[in-house]
Amino acid sequence: MPSNCRRTDAYPYVVRHNPVTYFPGLARDCERWDRPMGTTSDGRLVDMVRDGRLPTFLLVIPDQCHNAHDCAVDVGDDWLSQVVPLLTSGPDYRAGRTAVVVTWDEGAGGKFGQRCQRDRDRSCHIVTVVISPTTRPGTRSPVRFDHYSLLETTEGLLGIGTRLGHAGDTRTRSMRRAFGL
């Protein structure tokens, strides 16, 4: 993102991947909290990690090249190979106050518009990787999780009692137990 709370595309940044811009109730605080991360060697994120000042919730969204939509997969892999070690190198992570969840917004192949809560189409399989001091390396779960599971898990970790949307459904499974969060 080229500037705080950017509400228009500036390729490779696309506003559609920036959720806060869709919530009018957050507009007053958008300039303060929705900020560019900088690079993986210099900038706001590096400073926050180094100084142990990560916020309670941090959402890092790569641009269209680093998310491998418009560039080769190895470009996205290279970006992740810098960002994940950065996040896990700081005092917040070492003190057990940080969990890193890397997830994608869509699967590969298949059809679009299906209901992944009931369909088993390949495009419903979304890769999600959980990294935390309390998650055993190599942990896998046979439980079927979805984006609502991630939302329910996040709300639970943040102590938010009311669940948004389908995160509150009885069928939605938290990822906390499976990944030791």
Image (cartoon, rainbow, N blue to C red):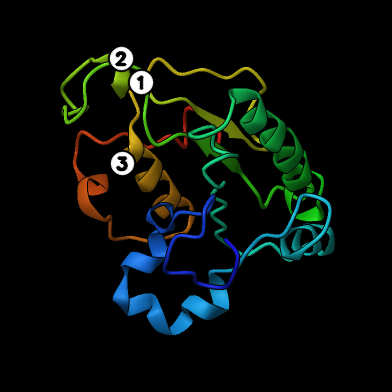
Relative to 131, does residue 111 appear above or below in the rendering? above
- Report x, y in % for residue 122: 30, 14
Contact, mark 2 vs mark 1 (Cβ under 8 Å): yes
Q: Out of 38 and 139, give the one closest to the viewer.
A: 38
Relative to 13, does residue 6 appear above or below in the rendering? below
The residue drawn where x is 43% and y is 34% is 175
- Residue 78 lies in quadrant: top right
Report the disc number at residue 125. Answer: 1
- Residue 32 lies in quadrant: bottom right
Relative to 73, does residue 96 appear above or below in the rendering? below
Element assignment for label 3: helix
Identify residue type, mark 3.
Tyr
Report the disc number at residue 122. Answer: 2
The residue drawn where x is 60% and y is 39% is 66
Identify residue type, mark 2.
Arg
**In the rendered view of the protein, which quadrant contains the C terminus?**
top right
Mark 3 nearby-residue class (10 Å; few <14, some 14–19, many ≥20): many
Mark 2 nearby-residue class (10 Å; few <14, some 14–19, many ≥20): some
> Residues under labels 3 and 1: Cα distance?
14 Å
**In the rendered view of the protein, which quadrant contains the N terminus?**
bottom right
> Residues under labels 2 and 1: Cα distance?
6 Å
Element assignment for label 2: helix
Residue 171 visible in image: yes
> Residues under labels 2 and 3: Cα distance?
18 Å
Left or right: 103 in relation to 19:
right
Report the disc number at residue 148. Answer: 3
